[in-house]
Amino acid sequence: QTVYLSDYTPFGFVVERVELTFRLAPESTRVTSRIRFAPNPETTDRTFFLHGEELRLVSARIDGAEVTPDVTERGLTCAVPDAAFTWEAEVEIAPAKNTALEGLYMSNGMYCTQCEAEGFRKITYYPDRPDVMASFDVRIESDLPVMLSNGNPGAAGDGFAEWHDPWPKPAYLFALVAGELEARSDTFTTRSGTPVDLNLWVRPGDLPKTEWGLEALKKSMRWDEEVYGREYDLDVFNIVAVDDFNMGAMENKGLNIFNSSAVLASPDTSTDANFERIEAIIAHEYFHNWTGNRITCRDWFQLCLKEGLTVFRDSQFTADMRSAPVKRIGDVIDLRARQFPEDQGPLSHPVRPDSFQEINNFYTATVYEKGAEVIGMLKRLVGDDDYAKALDLYFERHDGQACTIEDWLTVFEDATGRDLSQFKRWYTQSGTPRLSVEERYEGSDYTLTFRQHTPTTPGQDEKAPQVLPIAVGLLSPNGDEVVPTTLLEMTEAEQSFTFPNMASRPVPSLLRGFSAPVVLEREASAEQRAFLLAHDTDPFCRWEAGRGLARAALMASVTEGAAPDVAYLDGLRQVVADPALDPAFRALMLQMPTQSELAQALAEAGTTPDPDAIFAAQEALMRAMAERWQDLLPDLAEQARVTQPYAPDAAQSGKRALGAAVLSLQTRLDGGTAARAQFDSADNMTLRLSALGCLVRADAADDALAAFEAAWSHDRLVMDKWFGIQIMLAPPAKAADRAAELTGHPAFEMTNPNRFRAVMGALASNHAGFHRADGAGYDLLAHWLGKLDAKNPQTAARMATAFQTWRRYDADRRARMQTALRTLRDRPGLSGDMSEMVGRLLGDG
Ligand code: ARG
Ligand code: ZN
């Protein structure tokens, strides 16, 4: 059933205190709760409803007297006193049978929890909503050596451990971990001088992979003090790595729980990209301590309040730790790859949705990444100083509260005096705005006229103009910057901005830094793009010019069978060969638009995308590039060579990224000789895996794959790479068969989300492979999503998004995808998560 933002009402009671005792047993864990409730003065509704699912109620008492509540599948109601009272209950749960990985579950013998968003109700009866905040006392009983919960440690002894969390929190931030774990430990002293014990807990054997994560944690703690003035607030900070986890990680108060893929790293088993991602996720979860935990969300419609802001903060952190331009370009690539298709398809929803059936389906690129873009626009509009003032006010005013987007925007209005009522549309209006522009040069006046328009999206037929911060610079025809970056603030559907006294007609550099998450519809000529590629001072726009040229060349090759554009290749060569430029930036310049991005661009241009033709065009362009740059490649490979011992820092990673791009071109010429040599000699996973990828792409990887498997079969995270890469980069005709075959591999475990994603996620990401004309890719994915749905609805439903672009393809493929989705929809016992997703995908939900 659907929940609406407009239906919000506060809970009838406040929780003054929570005491929980866990007696752990795999099949029959007993949870006893003692909860102090008092009437909530904010409301007169005294309905006493506690959420509870998949619980066996053993007993319940109010003020010591046994009661018999009305129990349904969703929770219980009970008659309660008029004044404050104590609720006690005992329930039984079976963590060993919990394959949904929500609530209390087991992973390799270790107990662990995931409560966000609504998992606590699978642990005990409770008002499981984020606006109910309370301090928790927890006692864990078991014979396991390590027993952890939120807050500070209390008494511990033979067979028990107690924890006390002084900071009031919603139930979604509750966590418990117990198992045979080992920790790498350290101390961090806060700016005000308080020591904090840091521990990163792992299964025995994984300790060598914990150094990077702990370093990232210390960097994050320091950064949040220096940049946001935020200090940590408990005596200990624990992080636990778990192999079976639906998401990346979770910010439980004082006890962050991580998917092991998002925290464990070593040079021999992890790539540069893994290291960077881990650093960012550690930061993200740590930053939630203030943006999420100390200040949380009133209800789940406000999810972007904590996620958009925290993603924005972790992007700032990565920009500071590494290269800001490279991070920005990477974020835009990611936004366009994941958020744009979502916002332009059947799953489109506002950054703050106003209704949902299953909140787990709204942990999306729109809420997270577009949510972060919205914060970035706000910061740009008010300026850095006012942004800092507003954030200080936010922390001061709302600490300890459960807030809304209205609260957030009011803080900015109060701190800056700005009216943000129109800006608020970024939170309520879905869809990607399209921005077109016309130039006029008259006398010495140069005028830019912009028009914005947002296409309709499901449930929203009317769109109003958004506030668009458009950063522009102007270049003179000889390449000098005559107007440095200037912020234009567009608020109307159509608006002109004039730059007087321009001695000659300038070349505009538009949407610098990607200052607004829009599609810029601009008929820039190839000459203009080439000019910007050569001269723009804004790294994003420079990269964008190259990307635009590549996209145009590829589209021409798909639609007209045009030969690869030689002028483009020569222009790109100037940039790529320039030793003064950051190798990471040059690697980004070499990264071609993805096949999916091309499919989207073709569809927008009114051409039905043919996945095979797109693949062929991309291959032809890469081959042409390799041939035309034959003389350059050895020199580039030399520039990309790292001579120092391995370090996952920005400088080395950038070189290796450039090296990987060069190797991929080289493989087009030599069929894999260089890649095989690199594979054999590599002393780190980055070089080894990029070589393996080239071999797979060249369909010359059989031996290498066998050697890799033999060497790494003991390491789950490395084996995920092995499963993934051979499907992701397989020749399109082979991808679905390879994926099907690998589901029969003894190490394929569908209940492990990482392994399932390694296979099925890889298939979905092989564009031409997934869209094989006979529908084999669709059927295989839908079949496995159905199977997984019965065990783990959250992960299954999330992966169904692979079908979100189904309407853009030809009638035959469309029909096959529709049939696959309908078959999935009609499965008996389909979960609520999946039925909402499939309903929305098909457009009948
Ligand atoms: N709050 C977590 C994070 O972004 C993600 C939790 C996801 N939970 C879920 N049910 N989808 O850091
Ligand atoms: Zn988050």
Image (cartoon, rainbow, N blue to C red):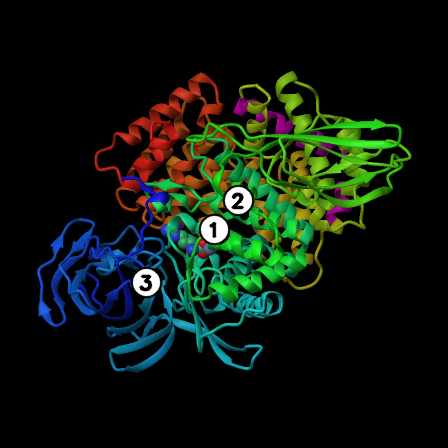
Mark 3 lies on residue: 112
Tell me whether the residue at label 3 lies in contact with that at label 1, contact meaning CB atoms closer than 8 angstroms. no
Give the camera-side residue of 643 and 427: 427
Distance from the alpha carbon under mark 3 to that under mark 1: 32 Å
The location of residue 124, given as percent across then percent down, is 22, 61
| Residue 774, percent from left and from top | 41, 22
Of 580 and 11, which appears nearest the observer? Answer: 11
Where are the magenta residues, as a range? 609-637
Residue located 44% across and 32% down the image: 804
Specify the quadrant of the image occupied by residue 67: bottom left
Q: Secondary structure at mark 2?
A: loop
The kind of residue tagged 1 is Ile
Q: Are marks 1 and 2 in contact (CB under 8 Å)?
A: yes
Q: Which residue is mark 1?
A: 405
Question: In the image, which disc is placed on residue 424?
Answer: 2
- Label drawn at residue 495: none
